[in-house]
Image: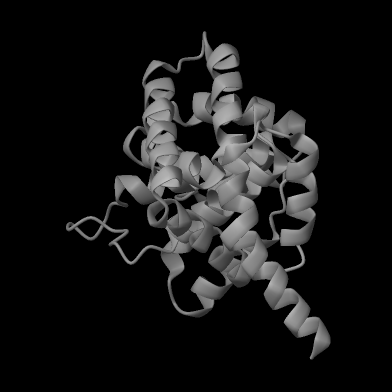
Amino acid sequence: VGEKVYKLHIEALLSICVLPWMSLIRPNPQLSSHVLNLIKMFSFSVRTKIYKHATSSFTQTRYLGTLADRATRATQRILRRLSKENSKHLGRKLGKLMNRYPCTVVRVVLEQVQSYPNMIQVVVESLKYSSTLSLDVLVNSLIVCMSSSKSKIKSDGQHVELWFSSLCSFAGALFKRFKLIDLSATLQYVLNTVKDGQILDLLILKELITQMTGIEVLRDISETQRLLLSAGSHLQMHH
């Protein structure tokens, strides 16, 4: 009972005080690391609750709300200008914003990649200046977005909606770029949804495998191609 009460107090402290009010101080990597170590005490569902509560705190306090609005507009300006050529320069600016307002900036970043999949690679590259806490918020928010009740299939019943296919591609690129990010929550999400019959979420696993290993998933493979895969390099070269 004592440990349970202790964790409840820590959860409340993180969601009501620590995460929202970190926006009032300059980005501090050491502080972010200590906060993340505390957050890792909790399960994925509790962490989701903590981040959600922290986000709502910005709407309940006028001063924090003003800061969140400024961070949103600043993030949007950076993402509009972001390109392969300036990803290092703007990535530093994005990292500073993300480390100070992780919940706010993550929301804008995910909105961007859902609408503009051609920006996925450059956005991922620009995240290299983000703290481990910011990346944890990003992965958590990404899973929440992928579990949205919105339709993942277009009205024709054959093609995947852009927002979902973009998030799947983003997940693959993100985990390929940042190998120290914990994959377990994402894999557990895929496992749980597939158990519930939502097989479309296997697209997430497909993107993870394809991008992290470089192994392309072939859909329609002929008998000859299948046999060649088990043949030696000499036979494959002369076929």
Vertically, is 162 above or below 203? above
* Location of residue 134 in the rendering, given as x and y in whole percent from the top left corner: 63, 43
Which residue is located at x 51 percent, y 23 percent? 122
Question: Quarter-wise, where is residue 190 in the image?
Answer: bottom right
Quadrant of the snapshot with the N terminus: bottom right
Vertically, is 55 above or below 102? below
Which residue is located at x 66 percent, y 38 percent? 176
* Location of residue 18 in the rendering, given as x and y in whole percent from the top left corner: 65, 54
* Location of residue 202 in the rendering, given as x and y in whole percent from the top left corner: 50, 61
Give the camera-side residue of 62 and 84: 62
Can residue 214 be seen by looking at this rendering?
no
Question: Quarter-wise, where is residue 179 in the image?
Answer: top right
Which residue is located at x 59 percent, y 47 percent? 21
Vertically, is 82 above or below 194? above
Give the camera-side residue of 159 and 162: 162
Given the current orientation, which residue lies at the most extreme left position?
155
Quadrant of the snapshot with the C terminus: top right
Can residue 83 be seen by looking at this rendering?
yes
